[in-house]
C-alpha cells in the first residue's frame, strides 16, 4: 500500500547540507497499523511527510498503491492526497471555526454538495464521540477532544490511508489511551491503513502490527511488533522496549542478589500466545524438584496475544536446573541472565 524505496532527504541551509533521512526502505501493507519510532530528530516527520509529498525525497521513491507519487500531475496528486488523511500532534484546527466547520473543511474543499456535508459531518462526530460538541469552538475543548476533531476531519473524505504525526504526544496517558483506542477502531471498522510516527513505545505496543525504529535518519531495526518486543536487537530498540516492558532487572534486585551472595541461576523466559496461560513453572518445579523465585517481569498483550517476559531464579540441584531449562526450552524461549552484564 505504501512502499518506501531507498528514500533519502537532504536539507541544504547556510550551514551546509544535512541528511535527515538516509536510505529508508520498508513496506506498509493494506489494513496494517505501522509505527515508526525514534527519538526527536530521528527523521520520522520528514519521512512520513514524503508519503503525501509535503516533503519531496531527494532520492529514492515512495509508492502509494503502486503509484510513484513524484511522477503524478498536479491534478492526479490532488486526487491521491484525498485518499490520504493526516492527523497532527498539535491538532492544527482552525480556532475561528466551530467543530462542525472544522470537520467540514475537507468536504467543502473537495466540492461535496451542501446537502451531503451535514449528514457526513454528523456521522463523523458521532463516530469520534463528539456528537454533542458540533457548535463548540476548539478553545472550549480538551486536548483529547481536539484530537478527536482532527481525526474526524482526517476521515471526512473517506481516505484509504491515515498518517499520524505524533498524534498522542501532546496528551496525558489516559487521553493517549482513548485516542489509541479510537485509531484502532478507525483501522478495524473502516479498514484504513495507518502509518503512525511516535517517540512513545506505548503507542507501538498498544496498536501497531509492524514497526521500524529510526535513529539519525536511518532504519536500525524493523519487524513485527511481537518480534521486536520479544527479541529486540539494537541497543536503542532495547531501551525503547525496556521503557514500557521493564524487561531488565532493576538495580534493587541486582543489589539484593549481590548482598545475599547466592550463586543460583537466573533465566529469562518469554511466554507467547497460548503458552502464556500454561503453568510451566509449577510443572518443572514439581518434576525436577526445584524452587523458583520470580524476580521480575510482567505479562502483557501484544498484537492481541498474551506475552510474558519473566526473570526467574531456580533453586536446586545443578543437574535438575539444566534439565528443567531444557524442558522449558522445548516450549518457550529461555536464556540465562548474567546480572554482571546488563543486556
Ligand atoms: N525544513 C528543514 N530544513 C532543515 N532541516 C530540517 C528541516 N526539517 C527537518 N530538518 C532536520 O531534520 C532532522 C529530522 O527532523 P524530523 O522533524 O524529521 O525528526 P523527527 O524524528 O520527526 O523529530 P521530532 O519528533 O523532533 O520532529 C532534524 O535534525 C531537523 O532539524
Image (spheres, rainbow, N blue to C red):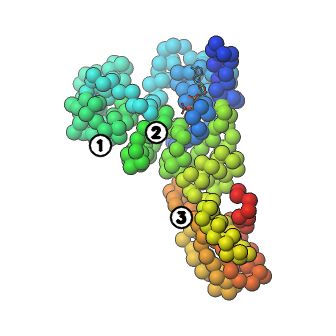
**Pointer 2: what residue?**
169
The disc, 1 or 2, on the residue closer to the chain's N-terminal end is 1
The vertical placement of 99 against 291, above or below, is above
- The answer to whether mark 2 is within 8 Å of ligand 1 is yes
What is the quadrant of the C terminus in the image?
bottom right
Residue in the image at 57% along x and 74% along y = 278
The disc, 3 or 2, on the residue closer to the chain's N-terminal end is 2
Q: Marks 1/2: CA distance?
A: 20 Å
What is the quadrant of the N terminus in the image?
top right
Query: Is residue 180 shown left or right of residue 222?
Result: left
Residue 108 in the image: state x and y as whole percent.
32, 20
The disc, 3 or 1, on the residue closer to the chain's N-terminal end is 1
Q: What is the quadrant of residue 29 in the picture?
A: top right
**Pointer 1: what residue?**
129
Q: Secondary structure at mark 1?
A: loop
Residue 334 in the image: state x and y as whole percent.
69, 67
Residue 261 in the image: state x and y as whole percent.
71, 75
User: Label for residue 293?
Assistant: none
Which of 184 and 77 lies nearest the eye of the viewer? 184
Asked whether the residues under the numbered discs 1 and 2 touch, taking CB atoms below 8 Å apart as contact, a structural biologist would say: no
Badge 2 local density, few (<14 within 10 Å), some, or many (20+)? Answer: some
Pair 3/2: label in front: 2
Q: Secondary structure at mark 3?
A: strand
Which of 323 and 141 lies nearest the eye of the viewer? 141
Amino acid at each position: 500500500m505504501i512502499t518506501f524505496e531507498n528514500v533519502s532527504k537532504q536539507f541544504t541551509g547556510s550551514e551546509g547540507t544535512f541528511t535527515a533521512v538516509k536510505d529508508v526502505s520498508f513496506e506498509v501493507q493494506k489494513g496494517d497499523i505501522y509505527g515508526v519510532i525514534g527519538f526527536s530528530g530521528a527523521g520520522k516527520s520528514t519521512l512520513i511527510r514524503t508519503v503525501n509529498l509535503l516533503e519531496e525525497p531527494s532520492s529514492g521513491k515512495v509508492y502509494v498503491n503502486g503509484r510513484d507519487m513524484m511522477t503524478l500531475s498536479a491534478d492526479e496528486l490532488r486526487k491521491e492526497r484525498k485518499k490520504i488523511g493526516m492527523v497532527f500532534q498539535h491538532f492544527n484546527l482552525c480556532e475561528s471555526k466551530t467543530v462542525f466547520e472544522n470537520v467540514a473543511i475537507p468536504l467543502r474543499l473537495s466540492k461535496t454538495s451542501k446537502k451531503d456535508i451535514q449528514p457526513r459531518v454528523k456521522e463523523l462526530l458521532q463516530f469520534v464521540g463528539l456528537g454533542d460538541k458540533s457548535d463548540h469552538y476548539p478553545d472550549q475543548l480538551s486536548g483529547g477532544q481536539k484530537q478527536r476533531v482532527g481525526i474526524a476531519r482526517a476521515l471526512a473524505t473517506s481516505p484509504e490511508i491515515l498518517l499520524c504525526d505524533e498524534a498522542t504526544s501532546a496528551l496525558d496517558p489516559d487521553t493517549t489511551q482513548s485516542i489509541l483506542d479510537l485509531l484502532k477502531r478507525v483501522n478495524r471498522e473502516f479498514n484504513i491503513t495507518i502509518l503512525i510516527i511516535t517517540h512513545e513505545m506505548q503507542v507501538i505496543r498498544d496498536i501497531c502490527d509492524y514497526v521500524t525504529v529510526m535513529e539519525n535518519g536511518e532504519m536500525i531495526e524493523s519487524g513485527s511488533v511481537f518480534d521486536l518486543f520479544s527479541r529486540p536487537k539494537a541497543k536503542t530498540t532495547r531501551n525503547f522496549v525496556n521503557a514500557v516492558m521493564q524487561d531488565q532487572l532493576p538495580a534493587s534486585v541486582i543489589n539484593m542478589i549481590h548482598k545475599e551472595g547466592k550463586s543460583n541461576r537466573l533465566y529469562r523466559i518469554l511466554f507467547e500466545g497460548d503458552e502464556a496461560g500454561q503453568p510451566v513453572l509449577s510443572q518443572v518445579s514439581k518434576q525436577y524438584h526445584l524452587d523458583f523465585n520470580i524476580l521480575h517481569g510482567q505479562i502483557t498483550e501484544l498484537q492481541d496475544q498474551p506475552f510474558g517476559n519473566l526473570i526467574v531464579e531456580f533453586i536446586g540441584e545443578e543437574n535438575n536446573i539444566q534439565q528443567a531449562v531444557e524442558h522449558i526450552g522445548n516450549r518457550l524461549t529461555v536464556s540465562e541472565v548474567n546480572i554482571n552484564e546488563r543486556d
